[in-house]
Image (cartoon, rainbow, N blue to C red):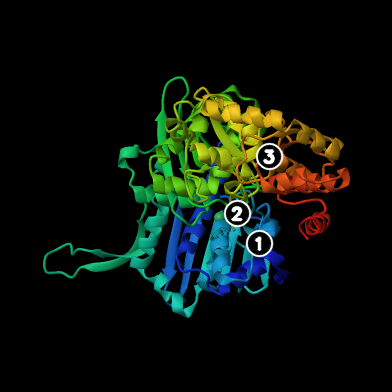
């Protein structure tokens, strides 16, 4: 039977083209990928053999081998794992199964530097073989198939591959790389040993390298001999089962890369062994970069689950809350049965207990990370917005999470989010009872907001926020260390002792003095506003709009809901005016109601513009403005 020719999935072809442009500076990553696949295949077989021992046949010693052939210029990575059927080879080695793949490729820009960064996050898996090879041959046999049901798959990495049935004597997979002329370095023993040790020390099965060994002579005076033999190059000890004291940082980092398919070092990790009521070992990592699909609904996240050292499943999302979905790692427990399924996991009381414990571990790891300002900065930049989902999702831990939050503040001149709530509270004015914050649509808009005028004048710090999630977060945060959160846009600022007596009296006097003016505004604006008041928070601006505390639908929230296609009733604000301002003074001088109406409209629109960042009818506003100042 002739081999069939198949076309790769479009995305694979794109990926191979990118690889051909050699976006990779670190070429040896192909070894990590292929050894990692071999190790996955062995894990899968091991798991199935628990219920079907026949699968292991007469070859129970699970292992990975690496053999170079200098004459043929080939490198072969083999395993006696689960193997593939013809159908499996055609799909697994012809498509990319990752969810959101299409999404990912639509993000590629054609800019080599940017794309190579992205692709590093995406992970290229098996196809990384084509970084160093101009032809790849895969010979494989599924553990449950007969020798004649073996498979031979081959490709030169340019658009197509061939596959056919072949006689394969043993179970498992061999991947043979026909190395490019300029990559023949990878045939050298020292080069392989170096890379393989690095990438496989933590792998639980032996990785054997075909090496030349020198044998000392048996008798004095005779020549020594060199022979070729299999030499084990890794420790073959599951890293997480080791005592944390005996594990080097380098090993933790490599294990992370194996586990997460990330090409960068992790930001930090936590390795714990717990005995007693609940027995488990966990190894959790925080990546340095956010995965490209952190906000994708299709994103798969979760820990690798092992039961009694046996790999059970990937991406078990039951063990951590959603707001910690960026945490990578594994959990190994003796308290779940080996045949646990996703459904069973969902219902198990052990899962609930583990989730509680692992959430604490993860938060603890983040708390520790917060002690390193530089690292925490990276962390917050990448995962801050996700952490903000925490206080709402995880009521039990909201105090802990609140301490981990970071915000921009009027104390800084930059948009950097680096002020913690504890820090804010520690430098609060003694007379200050509340934590003040402002949610706006950008840092620029927040930091120049008229609502800050009175706070600036009094030297009161205000936390500045502008991310999509902030409105929702703050709508759900009531207090921190006994201090209430108050939006500076609230109709009642509860300034308490912060408003000095003299000022209060002045405002009271202004209120009485301007009663008639206020009535005139109310009459002119009618239904458009909920109320009109004399402001005690404005100095440089003519007006602002405020909403009642607790009224959720503030500007930012509205924008989100409107963007999501929701029809919302017209927002009614309270308009605050500054009678000292020259525009308001000019308005009050308007002779007739029609002229005043225009001024009132103009002053109200200004306030809306500042709060919402845009107006429904900007041209009408400009026309009005030109008319009034013309
Ligand atoms: P990933 O490992 O992330 O799934 P890869 O591109 O590395 O992606 O591999 C694609 C798929 O090909 C694997 O999921 C697996 O099904 C199959 N595969 C690759 N290598 C092997 C192997 N040595 N043995 C069995 N199956 C393999
Ligand atoms: Mg892989």
- Quarter occupied by residue 567: top right
Q: Percent position (x, y) of residue 512?
A: 70, 28
Q: Nearer the viewer, mark 3 or mark 2?
A: 3
Q: Quadrant of residue 21?
A: bottom right
Q: Are marks 1 and 2 in contact (CB under 8 Å)?
A: yes
Q: Is residue 62 visible?
A: no
Foreground residue, 436 or 180? 436
x, y percent for residue 441: 65, 48
SS of the residue under disc 2: loop
The residue singled out by tag 2 in the image is 292
Whether residue 276 can be seen here: yes
Q: Which class describes the residues within 10 Å of circle 1: few (<14), some (14-19), or many (20+)?
A: few
Give the Cα separation between the discs numbered 3 and 1.
52 Å
**Mark 1 or mark 2, which has the lower sequence index?**
1
Q: CA distance from mark 3 to mark 2?
A: 51 Å
Question: In this rendering, would 232 be left or right of 414?
Answer: left
Q: Nearer the viewer, residue 82 or 560?
A: 560
Write down the residue under mark 3: 579
> Which residue is located at x 68 percent, y 45 percent?
542
What is the number of the mark on residue 199?
A: none
Q: Quadrant of the C terminus?
A: bottom right
Q: Is mark 2 within 8 Å of ligand 1?
A: no
Q: Residue at the spot x=33%, y=66% of the render?
A: 190
Provide the residue designation for mark 1: 107
Secondary structure under the numbered disc 3 in the rendered image: loop
Counting the numbered discs, the total is 3
Near mark 2 (Cα within 10 A), the count class, few <14, some 14-19 or many ≥20, is some
521 lies left or right of 306: right
């Amino acid at each position: 039977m002739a081999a069939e020719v198949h076309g790769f999935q479009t995305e694979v072809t794109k990926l191979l083209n990118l690889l051909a442009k050699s976006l990779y500076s670190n070429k040896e990553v192909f070894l990590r990928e292929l050894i990692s696949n071999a190790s996955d295949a062995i894990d899968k077989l091991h798991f199935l053999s628990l219920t079907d021992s026949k699968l292991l046949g007469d070859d129970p010693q699970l292992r990975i081998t690496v053999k170079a052939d200098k004459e043929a210029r080939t490198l072969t990575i083999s395993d006696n794992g689960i193997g593939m059927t013809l159908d499996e080879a055609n799909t697994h080695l012809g498509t990319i199964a990752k969810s959101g793949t299409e999404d990912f490729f639509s993000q590629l820009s054609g800019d080599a530097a940017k794309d190579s960064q992205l692709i590093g996050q995406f992970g290229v898996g098996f196809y990384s073989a084509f970084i160093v090879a101009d032809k790849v041959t895969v010979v494989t046999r599924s553990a449950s198939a007969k020798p004649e049901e073996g498979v031979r798959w081959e490709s030169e990495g340019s658009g197509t591959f061939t596959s056919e049935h072949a006689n394969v004597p043993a179970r498992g997979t061999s991947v043979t790389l026909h190395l490019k002329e300029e990559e023949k370095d990878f045939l050298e023993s020292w080069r392989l040993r170096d890379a393989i040790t690095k990438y496989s020390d933590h792998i639980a099965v032996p990785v054997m390298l075909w090496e030349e060994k020198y044998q000392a002579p048996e008798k004095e005076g005779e020549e020594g001999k060199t022979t070729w033999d299999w030499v084990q190059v890794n420790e073959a000890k599951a890293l997480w089962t080791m005592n944390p004291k005996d594990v080097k940082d380098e090993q933790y980092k490599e294990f992370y890369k194996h586990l997460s398919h990330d090409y960068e070092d992790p930001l930090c990790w936590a390795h714990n062994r717990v005995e007693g009521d609940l027995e488990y070992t966990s190894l959790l990592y925080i990546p340095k970069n956010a995965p490209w699909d952190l906000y994708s609904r299709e994103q798969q996240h979760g820990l690798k689950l092992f039961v009694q050292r046996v790999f059970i499943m990937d991406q078990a999302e039951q063990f951590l809350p959603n707001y910690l979905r960026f945490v990578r790692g594994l959990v190994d427990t003796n308290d779940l049965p080996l045949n646990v399924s996703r459904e069973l996991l969902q219902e198990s009381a052990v899962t609930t207990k583990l989730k509680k414990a692992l959430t604490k571990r993860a938060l603890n790891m983040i708390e520790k990370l917060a002690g390193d300002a530089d690292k925490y900065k990276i962390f917050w930049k990448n995962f801050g917005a996700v952490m903000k989902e925490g206080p709402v999702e995880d009521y039990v831990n909201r105090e802990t999470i609140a301490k981990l939050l970071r915000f921009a503040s009027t104390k800084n001149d930059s948009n950097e989010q680096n002020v913690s709530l504890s820090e804010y509270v520690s430098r609060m004015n003694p007379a200050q009872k509340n934590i003040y914050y402002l949610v706006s649509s950008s840092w620029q808009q927040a930091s120049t907001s008229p609502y800050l005028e009175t706070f600036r004048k009094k030297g009161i710090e205000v936390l500045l926020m502008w991310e999509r999630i902030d409105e929702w977060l703050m709508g759900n945060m009531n207090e921190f260390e006994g201090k209430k959160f108050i939006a500076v846009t609230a109709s009642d600022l509860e300034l308490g002792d912060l408003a000095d007596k003299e000022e209060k009296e002045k405002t009271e006097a202004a209120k009485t003095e301007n009663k008639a003016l206020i009535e005139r505004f109310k009459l002119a604006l009618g239904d458009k506003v909920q109320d009109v008041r004399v402001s005690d928070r404005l100095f440089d601006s003519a007006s602002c709009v405020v909403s009642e505390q607790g009224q959720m639908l503030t500007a930012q929230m509205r924008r989100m809901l409107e963007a999501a296609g929701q029809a919302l009733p017209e927002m009614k604000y309270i308009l605050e005016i500054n009678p000292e301002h020259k525009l308001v003074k000019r308005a009050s001088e308007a002779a007739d109601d029609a002229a005043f109406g225009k001024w009132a409209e103009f002053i109200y629109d200004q306030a809306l513009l500042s709060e919402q960042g845009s107006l429904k009818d900007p041209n009408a506003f400009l026309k009005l403005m030109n008319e009034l100042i013309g």
